[in-house]
Image (spheres, helix red, strand yellow):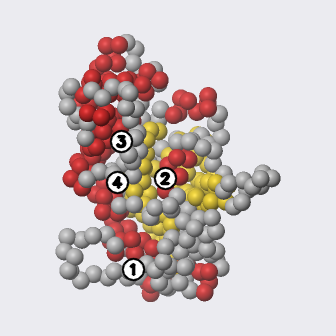
Amino acid sequence: MTQPLLEVRNLKKHFPLRTTFFGGAQGVVHAVDGVSFSIAKGETLALVGESGCGKSTVGRAILRLFDITSGEVLIEGRRIDDLTAGQLRPLRRRVQVVFQDPFSSLNPRMRVRDILAEPIRNFGLAASDAELDKKIADLIEIVRLPGDSAGRWPHEFSGGQRQRIGIARALAAAPDLIICDEAVSALDVSVKAQIVNLLQDLQRQLGLALLFISHDLAIVEHMTHRVAVMYLGRIVEMGPKQAIFATPRHPYTKALLSAVPVPDPEAPRNRTILKGDVPSPINPPPGCHFHTRCPVAMARCRIETPVLRDHEPDHSVACHLYDAPTVGSVDG
Ligand code: SF4
């Protein structure tokens, strides 16, 4: 088996919740609670779930924006979660990020040229000014910005164009993996489609891997190879896009998919309306975190934590319904 580009093993990130006057923590937010997955070179994995499920924390942990509580993050088999800043520096180039908000993620006091030059200089990717200019011109062309963009300021661009600048900045470091953290969520529908198409084209052209973090399953369906569904800090289902969308297994995935808008809203379909809100990650429900909202919860779900297991090759589910050998009886 070929080595994955990125591997995340049993990742946990718990945030202490405000310390008391005497220095003790008043609680702990279980933002990420034992997440494992891998991404191959040139592959897209979509990490989906409702707001607050921990998916963006996973992205930030991979980027080492903070120290993780436990677990391992590996790039081509090499652990990066325990490296010092100096040791991490050569590896930082390989994983870049595009953030959600194209308005706040660009420095308004830097022209596009300087925004793109920064990573190229930081990582020593141009031997001369002429090479730097050539790289900047290529980046502007590859993300389909107007030819005169280099000398302009971020405020002169639309939201979609600013996100193209953000993508160009990520590409400037010549990465192997780009983490797109809700990268199209703030954009209008038509602009969203253009940016998704651009990301897909770039992926094919440059052989990039993408970790596409999103709450929007309709967008994910168009651009990913595999999907991992998160709920309250844990992955509850993971598999190839076709399997997740055509034959979802976990009750939460089924509910999420049943809420995706369809072209004909009058057409008959099985809708699962989830009761209540996502419980607090400060004190998540015991057993299966989803049992407080699951329409088919059983007594054991309140006590036993389901393990993410292969249900079919490459399609894993964390649900007690699939622990029994009579798996066929719960399909549907
Ligand atoms: Fe529902 Fe139980 Fe499965 Fe959790 S383990 S999703 S509560 S049936």
Q: Position of residue 298 (x, y in %)?
A: 56, 86
Residue 127 position within the rendered picture, expressed as x and y whole percent measured from the top left:
40, 14
Task: Measure how far apart labels 2 and 4 are at the Cα level.
Answer: 13 Å
- 125 left or right, relative to 23: left
Contact flag, marks 2 and 4 (Cβ < 8 Å): no
Which mark is nearer the camera, 3 or 1? 3
Please state if 43 lies on the left or on the right of 95 as rendered: left
What x and y, as percent, mark residue 196? 28, 49
Identify which residue is drawn at 51% across, 34% down. 92
Residue assigned mark 3 = 103
- Dot 2: element: helix
Amino acid at circle 4:
Ser
Q: Amino acid at mark 3?
A: Phe
Element type where label 3 sits in the image: loop
Give the quarter of the image for residue 88.
top right
Which comes before the other along the chain, label 4 or label 1? 4
The amino acid on which the numbered mark 2 sits, given as a three-letter code, is: Ser
Where is 98 relative to 292, above or below?
above
Is tag 1's residue or tag 2's residue first in the polypeptide sequence?
2
* Label 1 crowd (10 A; few <14 / some 14-19 / many >=20): few
Classify 186 as above or below 313: above
For label 4, the residue is 185
- Disc 2: which residue: 56
Quickly name the residue at label 1. Answer: 273
**Element under label 4?**
loop
Q: Depth check: 223 or 27 in front?
A: 27
Q: Is mark 2 within 8 Å of ligand 1?
A: no
Marks 2/3: CA–CA distance? 19 Å
203 horizontally vs 79: left or right: left
Q: Are marks 1 and 2 in contact (CB under 8 Å)?
A: no
